[in-house]
Amino acid sequence: PSPTARFALHPAFTVGQVHPRLFGSFVEHLGRCVYTGIHEPGHPEADAAGLRQDVLALVRELGVTAIRYPGGNFVSNFRWEDSVGPVADRPRRLDLAWRTTEPNAFGLSEFMAFLKKLGPDAEPMLALNLGTRGVAEALELLEYANHPAGSALAERRIGHGDKEPFGVRMWCLGNELDGPWQTGHKTAAEYGRLAAETARAMRQYDPELTLVACGSSNQGMPTFGAWEAEVLTETYDLVDHISLHAYYEEKDGDRDSFLASAADMDSFIENVVATCDHVGAKLKSDKRIQLSFDEWNVWYQHRFHEQIEAEPLDWPEAPRLLEDHYTVTDAVVFGSLLITLLRHADRVTAACLAQLVNVIAPIMTEPGGPAWRQTTFFPFAQASRHGRGEVLDVRADSPTYRTKKYGEVPLLHTTAVRDPESGAVTVFAVNRSQSETLPLRVALDAGLALTRIEEHSVLSDADPDARNTLEDPERVTPHPGEGAALGADGLTAELEPLSWTMIRLA
Ligand code: AHR
């Protein structure tokens, strides 16, 4: 028999409370995320505002909370004024980030209407252009968005038909300004200063805003660490979060390493926490900076580069870009990234799955046609629905396997979340083995008072490359798991090879 993975759960050993913003997502004016994604006037499913109802229903089912908008790289040359007011009067602009043309047919007001339709749990996370613009424009957008009435920009919003202020609480101070590809790329000193000035001015209007400073675009950046330290030294008292971004893809057929991508995310988080706390200690501050992992996903970046090398973009409108079609393997990696975010719920209090529709997304659409769920949709929807409450401290003892990139890695990656009201516990687990079932034993403290298995759901497939497509949109869906049991010794289960599993205990 293959070796068994084990862990114990105890109600007193916890990591922290899951913040609703952990289940955020991201809508950028990129490719078909907005146009023919969430917004497609004339589509049979579109409402009077052009919002696709089929997409809205899927976004609701996905359980997305905060949505970051409007970029991404796009935001660093974006003029927010272009995106408000009568649509017919809005200018067409060149988007330098993606070499496309932005028609501005969808803007701030339409985005807020979209959020409203999602329901009361969806909140905006607006990104500011600190690439080509600065403090003045940030303040103007803040006034337009949040001031109730009686000032020029509040009245402009009201004149545009939005009587109620948008009440945006969370603001990102720019995007990936450490990256040389970013319009208005800056050094850490330049950015830190600008972020501090912007934050200070915004807090003069509203001290309670939640502000996010840009961290590194990924852990591999040559400036990683030094960037965070310098930016935080400038902004420590002025911001609440520092951002992290990370994307993973299978390279050179090394699936073993790809399956262990969460090891990179884990060390990334731990390194940023260490830097934050080091700066805090140096500044003799009791404040703890939070982490906003506001871009994360599996993304086959090399396919994008191949596409634009083969046919450079000549300023098209809403072209097909970054339209990755995710496999079961991708969903398992994706699930393990979600597990890692949950395991760090004490410090990661915001996270955005990048992105929401069509662009490296859990939801795909066809112009004039249907919308469907990718494989990655399912772990997110399950975790958002059942992963609320307190994350239990899980220290698993698991058999390992060898990877080129990360050395020995556990086959099991797991977390458990307890709903403090009902006492229900949900275990999320990934088996990274490509060929072997992984036996699992979970010792449950009597204080948890768990008596039954409510649900056992598995995402796996005989074909690890199976995916959902326009032609076969339901090829991959979760299926009920078999053979899990709850007894005097706790929970026993068999985790299928290359699988994502959710077991709900009540
Ligand atoms: O999500 C795609 C892009 O990835 C974003 O625009 C950018 O912020 C990141 O590099």
Image: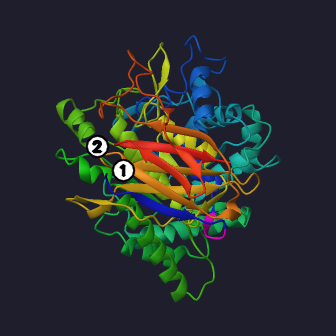
Crowd rating for badge 1 (residues with CA inside 10 Å; few <14, some 14–19, many 20+): some
Magenta residues: mostly which secondary structure? strand
Residue at 40% across / 51% down in the picture? Answer: 439
Look at mark 2 in the image and give the residue it sits on: 301
Crowd rating for badge 2 (residues with CA inside 10 Å; few <14, some 14–19, many 20+): some
Left or right: residue 361 compared with residue 410: right
Of residue 151 and residue 203, the one placed in the foreground of this image is 203
Q: Which of marks 1 and 2 is nearer the N terminus?
A: 1
Q: Which residue lies furthest to the right in this view?
A: 150
Rounded to the nearest whole Å, what is the CA distance between mark 1 and mark 2? Answer: 8 Å
Amino acid type shown at disc 2: Gln
Look at mark 1 in the image and give the residue it sits on: 247
Of residue 281 and residue 86, the one placed in the foreground of this image is 281
Pointers 1 and 2 in contact (C-beta within 8 Å): yes
Q: Would you say the beta carbon of the disc 1 residue lies within 8 angstroms of ligand 1? A: yes
Residue at 26% across / 54% down in the picture? Answer: 257
Position of 178 relative to 419 (above/below): below
Residue 489 makes an appearance in the image:
yes
The residue stretch that appears in magenta: 12-16
The numbered dot on residue 367 is: none
Residue at 60% across / 39% down in the picture? Answer: 455
Is 15 in the magenta?
A: yes
Q: What is the total number of numbered labels drawn onto the structure image?
A: 2
Q: Is mark 1 on a helix, strand or loop?
A: strand
Amino acid type shown at disc 1: Tyr
